[in-house]
Amino acid sequence: MAAEETYKIHWEGTPNGVHYLQIIRALYRYFGEKTLVSRIDTEDVDAFIAYLRSAGNSNGTINRKLACLSKILTEAEIKGKIPKKPRIRRQREMVGRIRWLDDLEEAVLLQLLRQWELHDQADCVEVLIDTGMRPSELRRVMVRDVDFEGGFVRVWETKNYEPRSIPMTSRVTAIMARRVAQKQPRDVLFPYDKEWLRRHWDRARSVKGLMDDPQFVPYVCRHTCASRLVKGGVPLGVIQKWMGHKSIQMTMRYAHLSPTDLLRGVPVLERHPVNRS
């Protein structure tokens, strides 16, 4: 009951609703659907973490499930169903290697899509790269969300529920203008499901011999945008707003891609007597 109430309050009808339903079902399978939240203590949570780890879940996946459990327990505490929420030990997550497209990979990918007459998919890839939008965000952009006068595309339904405006490059502007001309104000510009791009992307992935690269997926376009902004010297605070990261820590994952500030330390070390001998 507590899980269902939390779902209705926070997640029902949201873009991540199905995802949280899946986690709630996983919680039911472990704790039992009839188990009262008042019976769940810190030891139970720790045992749940150990179970998830033994099942092969990464720390990141474990944290996503713990976040759902934490929200349920917080709601229970607010409503007086439990005196105090048990301690939940979040797991340390390593920052993995970030995959992005280099200029040649982008050119080859777009060339293949155009060659196969998949012009809509090529448009999609170019917009994703230059805006950094999540594919799910692009699928919701309507004609009325494109501001040609200001040079922005408005994203209203986002992962963290905070709308943002993203500047348009010249090629994004051209693509949007071409698509807007064919539609009505409330029409979406890319009215496709998530498999629409993925199956053709995987076809190109196979041709390029990258089937063994697990990170070569459409989401790599978002990483490409962020990495190019960082390497171009755009301040991290600006990139955070551009990408729609909820915290600066998310943006900091890309910071090492532009280590030029660190190079200022080299002359300091070079002046040390040991290095001059």
Image: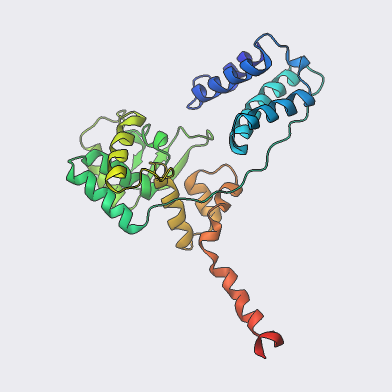
Q: Position of residue 268 (x, y in %)?
A: 65, 80
The image quadrant of residue 144 is top left
Q: Position of residue 225 (x, y in %)?
A: 42, 51
Residue at 34 percent of width and 28 percent of height: 193
Q: Is residue 248 above or below residue 30?
A: below
Q: Is residue 197 above or below residue 213?
A: above
Residue at 55 percent of width and 60 percent of height: 256
Q: Is residue 261 above or below residue 179?
A: below
Query: In the image, 169: left or right of 116?
Result: right
Q: Nearer the viewer, residue 151 or 135?
A: 135
Q: Position of residue 254 (x, y in %)?
A: 53, 54
Instruction: Report whether residue 80 is seen.
Output: no
Instruction: Report whether residue 48 is seen.
Output: yes
Residue farthest along the right direction in this orientation: 83
Residue at 47 percent of width and 27 percent of height: 15
Q: Position of residue 108 (x, y in %)?
A: 27, 52
> Which part of the image, by quadrant, shows the C terminus?
bottom right
Picture mark count: 0
Q: Nearer the viewer, residue 275 or 158?
A: 275
Residue at 61 percent of width and 14 percent of height: 4
Residue farthest along the bottom direction in this orientation: 277
Colouring scheme applied when the structure was drawn: rainbow
Residue farthest along the top direction in this orientation: 34
> Which part of the image, by quadrant, shows the N terminus?
top right
